[in-house]
Image: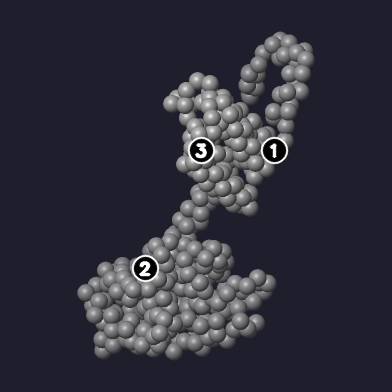
Amino acid sequence: MSSRPAPLIPPRLRSLLVRVPGLVRVVRFVRRGPLARDRNLTITLSALTLLVGILAAKVSTEWFSPSLLILIMLVGGLHLRLRSLAVLLVAVVLALGYFALTLGVGQVGLGLTVTIGFTAVLAVLMARTRGKLGVQGLRGDAMLLELRDRLKSQGELPQLPKDWGGKVVLKQAGGSSFGGDFLVSMRDGDNLEIALVDVSGKGVDAGTRALLLSGTFGGLLGSVDDFLPACNAYLHRQRGDEGFVTAVHVRIDLSTGAYTITSAGHPPVVKLDAGTGNWQVASAKGVVLGVVPDLHCEPDSGVLRKGDALLLYTDGLIEQPGRDIDAGLDKLLGEAERLLPSGFRDGARALVNSLASGHNDDCALVLIWRP
């Protein structure tokens, strides 16, 4: 048995209010349409602006300083549409004009005028950006934070068995939360699949495309047998310019240690052979994703035994202006021989910090090993 909630306004009082001339029309005007909130806020802020101007001129500039208009404009820039913000700025000009005419032009001051003008420009820029995104307030920043957290969660390796270890290190250019390097991975029983992807560009500029592609590639991983050809077909169908996208895909059987590497224009994977203590460069090759309609990869395979490790990385660790890629790879292997023997888990971060220092680029490193 359900009961209806009691009305906020008693029926008798409601019938009396309806008879008041023009009251229903006013209520409908306030509540009508999807832009009612914007309109009501515009009226409120404009009225508050004019009230501040009048009180500053007639009462006291200490209690009602014209600098309060700066806060009102910032609120308008965060919440109002561009047209509504224009109405608020007109109210600001009227309030300042009334204040200047009442107390004299010298009471406004050059510093206050410049500050209010700068704040007005900033408010317009904020309103234009929000208008393009279709959001209000700080919701746009919250959406970016949610996307960043999602990209971070996708970049974590799944839980591995006790006789396996893994470490992921992502370092974006300029300390940004977004970048063009990302990782997608999945585990289904003893089958582990890892894909390290590098989108052209760096920092936030490449981060938007990386966010889009991470969802697509994450959906394809584990769903198709030929992962990189499927990614290539998707990128080749896109009409927009996605730039260069390189990727390396590794499939590992956790029960036997057997692995298969496929690459699409990505720097080569290197393997640590515990028996010899040497790093071996994998021979997997392929064309950059999205360039040709049909991608043909030359895979490389092998077996990870106890003490062996696989090292995946992006070109940010080996490429520097004025230095050959082979020289960068030699430096990577040299640093790996020096830092990783002290411990794979701690050495991975030290390896990235050692190679990424001195230049500003996105860097990513994935290390899988058998203790």
Residue 102 place in picture, x, y as percent? 56, 26
Residue drawn at 57 percent across, 79 percent down: 289
Cα distance, mark 3 to mark 1? 28 Å
Q: Which residue is mark 3?
A: 70
Residue drawn at 36 percent across, 84 percent down: 328
Q: If you read the primary sequence from the N terminus, does the residue marked by circle 2 or circle 3 appear first?
A: 3
| Type of amino acid under label 3 | Ile
- Image quadrant holding the C terminus, namely bottom left
10 Å crowding of disc 1: few (<14), some (14-19), many (20+): few
Residue 252 place in picture, x, y as percent? 42, 77
10 Å crowding of disc 2: few (<14), some (14-19), many (20+): some
Snapshot quadrant of residue 216 = bottom right
10 Å crowding of disc 3: few (<14), some (14-19), many (20+): many
Residue 102 visible, this angle: yes
Left or right, 37 with reference to 23: left
Residue 231 visible, this angle: no
> In this picture, is 100 found above or below 360?
above
Q: Which residue is mark 1?
A: 34
Q: If you read the primary sequence from the N terminus, does the residue marked by circle 2 or circle 1 appear first?
A: 1
| Type of amino acid under label 1 | Pro
| Type of amino acid under label 2 | Val
Cα distance, mark 2 to mark 1? 46 Å
> In this picture, is 226 found above or below 300?
above
Residue drawn at 68 percent across, 72 percent down: 239
Residue 179 place in picture, x, y as percent? 47, 66
Q: Which residue is mark 2?
A: 169
- Callout 3: SS: helix
Residue drawn at 60 percent across, 78 percent down: 290
